């Protein structure tokens, strides 16, 4: 479990910890800017950041091989949580995604991302020699698909897409043969294009009406002005930040004040207005460094399992940053994906910190023979 004598603490990524601390501090500042007088989001986020950092440091000292031994237990616990969300979940903004435990509400789908990364890495490691076997692939797809489906029906399409992206990146990194990948691409690309056409039709049954409107609105913004309200104001807020932002502007009025859920889904709009183009680029640069550290950790991981976990975590951060910023800048349809370490939400924050802890532990592991 704890192997202090074997850990190479020279490889402990202090820069990663510092960057995450900086991002967390920036996030709490932005949340303080958007909270109303009757809210206490800043204090909650600050407490969550403290707990998350401590949790990441503790997790960084627990051997990921030890954690992966409980992959079945973690998987079952996760399924139980997701089923409880379906039967007794708390509803916010017409979505049933939260469980209430005493005074605490948490979102199990955020925990699902980390659990499935560990689960998939363990399964791929055990079945590495049979990774191209059809029955093995079917087993993995069903195992990942079940919790993903439960999340999708919450309704939580955004997190389902995150998990799907993570799984695709991990199975590619696991060594799936090009003899399988190429036919999937040849068949899959036309299918995806056909699916995209289908969900735009009036008779489609895959998306909820509001989800379909979000897709249609990005294609025909003039016809769906009410749906584009958040994104229109988000772009306006980012643009108003100009080059240097308004962080030193003493005026109380901000364009992001009229953006619903600005503390979470549209936190990048707040950052754009406060810090301007330069500050926004610096934020994106910090994300690039975090993702680069994760990818570099995967490249130099001591074993196959460590490589897969690092790839999964890098994929999680990459997809969430790309989609969140894409939504805030009106490049993608509106969807509720939090921006790692910046957005309000303790479940999301702790999930991101758990990823940091896993990356730190992989870097600490002694060198092993890796084929």
Image: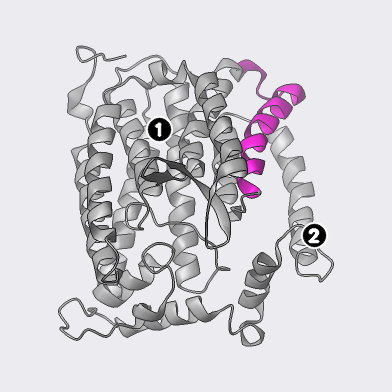
- For residue 37, side relative to residue 332 (left or right): left
The circle on residue 97 is none
- For residue 131, side relative to residue 288 (left or right): right
Q: Secondary structure at mark 2?
A: loop
Q: Residue at x 34, y 19 (%)?
A: 63
Q: Residue at x 22, y 52 (%)?
A: 46
Which contiguous range is marked in magenta?
A: 129-152
Q: Residue at x 49, y 76 (%)?
A: 231
Question: Is the magenta region chiefly helix, strand or loop?
Answer: helix
**Residue 123 appears in the picture as rendered:** yes
Cα–Cα gap, marks 2 and 1: 42 Å
| Residue 198 picture location, percent across and down | 80, 64
* Residue 38 is one of the magenta-drawn residues: no
Q: Is residue 119 above or below residue 246?
A: above
**Residue 177 appears in the picture as rendered:** no
Density class for disc 2 (Cα within 10 Å; few <14, some 14-19, many ≥20) is few
Decide which of 287, 212 is in the foreground and name it.
212
| Residue 114 picture location, percent across and down | 46, 36
Residue where numbered disc 2 is placed: 205
Residue where numbered disc 1 is placed: 299
Decide which of 89, 325 is in the foreground and name it.
89
Q: Is residue 194 above or below residue 222?
A: above
């Amino acid at each position: 479990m704890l192997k202090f004598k074997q850990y190479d603490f020279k490889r402990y990524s202090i820069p990663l910890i510092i960057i995450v601390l900086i991002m967390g501090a920036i996030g709490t500042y932005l949340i303080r800017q958007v909270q109303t007088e009757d809210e206490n989001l800043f204090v909650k986020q600050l407490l969550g950041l403290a707990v998350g950092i401590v949790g990441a440091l503790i997790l960084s000292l627990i051997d990921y091989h030890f954690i992966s031994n409980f992959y079945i237990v973690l998987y079952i616990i996760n399924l139980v949580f997701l089923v409880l969300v379906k039967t007794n979940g708390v509803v916010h903004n017409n979505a049933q995604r939260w469980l209430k435990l005493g005074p605490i509400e948490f979102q199990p789908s955020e925990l699902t991302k980390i659990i499935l990364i560990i689960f998939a890495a363990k399964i791929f490691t055990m079945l590495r020699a049979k990774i191209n076997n059809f029955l093995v692939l079917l087993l993995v797809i069903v195992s990942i698909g079940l919790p993903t489906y439960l999340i999708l029906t919450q309704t939580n399409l955004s997190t389902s897409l995150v998990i799907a992206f993570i799984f695709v990146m991990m199975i590619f990194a696991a060594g799936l043969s090009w003899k399988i990948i190429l036919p999937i691409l040849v068949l899959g690309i036309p299918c995806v294009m056909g699916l995209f056409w289908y969900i735009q039709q009036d008779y489609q049954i895959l998306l909820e009406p509001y989800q379909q409107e979000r897709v249609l609105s990005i294609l025909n913004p003039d016809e769906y002005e009410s749906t584009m309200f958040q994104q229109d104001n988000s772009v306006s807020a980012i643009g108003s930040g100009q080059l240097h932002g308004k962080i030193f502007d003493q005026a109380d009025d901000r364009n992001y004040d009229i953006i619903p859920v600005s503390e979470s889904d549209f936190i990048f709009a707040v950052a754009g207005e406060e810090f301007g183009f330069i500050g926004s680029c610096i934020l994106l640069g910090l994300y690039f460094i975090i993702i680069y550290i994760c990818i570099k950790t995967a490249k130099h991981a001591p074993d196959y399992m460590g490589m897969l976990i690092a790839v999964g975590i890098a994929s999680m951060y990459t997809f969430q940053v790309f989609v969140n910023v894409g939504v805030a800048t009106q490049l993608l349809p509106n969807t509720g994906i939090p921006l790692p370490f910046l957005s309000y939400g303790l479940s999301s924050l702790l999930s991101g910190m758990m990823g940091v802890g896993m990356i730190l532990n992989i870097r600490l592991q002694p060198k092993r023979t890796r084929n």
